[in-house]
Image (cartoon, rainbow, N blue to C red):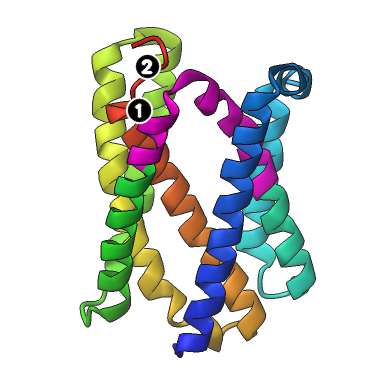
């Protein structure tokens, strides 16, 4: 993959993160507006995110580049809406520190994924299976067990899983340009890395973030 593709991926990744964090911060400063938007409930927002993620994953080969970009921006905005709750709950300086740590981890693993000669494709199924198991355990803990210690363990495991996904997805992006057009490869690569970064950030925040009450 040439540097031009990398540049496009990172530009779109930056745009997505900027929209998400900007939307979340803006809504946190306008609590009335945030509460009005959130009155529709979290479920519809999650459904929108899932639909967009599925369409991006399944239809990317046939999807028009402009459509892919639109879906990516929609996903970034809807995620930003849910992020407003994080800005309301956590101390801003704590979030900034966790963001910095997440960025450092992301850069290190992205470089590793892009430069390593080791085939990481065999880890894909392991990571997906681990994520699926963790989601089930998380739901069981939220609905039945309600154990704070289990939540901490889950967050720790999720950090490891998404660290793995960063390196794995970075290597996988290398072959995307041979499957789809350059524009779609860039936006799809940015979307994958966006998901990895956001999830890494959230779980690190759950582990080390300081609430405004502390």
Residue 97: give x, y in percent of width and height: 33, 39
Viewer-nearest of labels 1 and 2?
Answer: 1
Residue 101 visible, this orientation = yes
Look at 52% across and 27% down and name the residue there.
87
What number is the disc on residue 23? none
**Magenta segment boundaries in residue numbering:** 76-98
Look at 61% across and 84% down and name the residue there.
182
Write down the residue under mark 1: 206
Viewer-side residue, 185 vs 15: 15
In the image, taking residue 135 as reference, residue 15 lies left or right, namely: right
Viewer-side residue, 213 vs 204: 213
SS state under label 1: helix
Residue 126 visible, this orientation = no
Image quarter of the C terminus: top left
Residue 198: give x, y in percent of width and height: 46, 46
Distance from disc 1 to disc 2, alpha carbons, whole Å, reads 15 Å
What number is the disc on residue 141? 2
């Amino acid at each position: 993959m040439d540097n031009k593709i990398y540049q496009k991926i990172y530009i779109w990744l930056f745009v997505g993160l900027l929209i998400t964090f900007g939307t979340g911060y803006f809504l946190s400063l306008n609590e009335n507006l945030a509460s009005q938007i959130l009155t529709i409930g979290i479920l519809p927002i999650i459904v929108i995110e899932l639909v967009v993620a599925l369409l991006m994953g399944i239809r990317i080969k046939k999807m028009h580049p402009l459509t892919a970009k639109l879906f990516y921006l929609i996903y970034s905005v809807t995620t930003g809406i849910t992020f407003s709750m994080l800005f309301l709950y956590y101390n801003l300086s704590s979030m900034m520190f966790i963001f910095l740590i997440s960025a450092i981890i992301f850069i290190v693993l992205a470089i590793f994924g892009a430069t390593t000669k080791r085939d990481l494709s065999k880890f894909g199924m392991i990571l997906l299976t681990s994520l699926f198991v963790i989601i089930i355990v998380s739901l069981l803990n939220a609905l039945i067990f309600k154990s704070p210690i289990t939540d901490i363990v889950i967050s720790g495991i999720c950090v490891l899983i998404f660290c793995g996904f960063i390196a794995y997805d970075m290597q996988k992006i290398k072959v995307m340009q041979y499957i789809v057009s350059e524009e779609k490869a860039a936006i799809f690569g940015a979307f994958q890395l966006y998901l990895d970064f956001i999830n890494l950030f959230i779980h690190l925040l759950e582990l080390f973030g300081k609430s405004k009450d502390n």
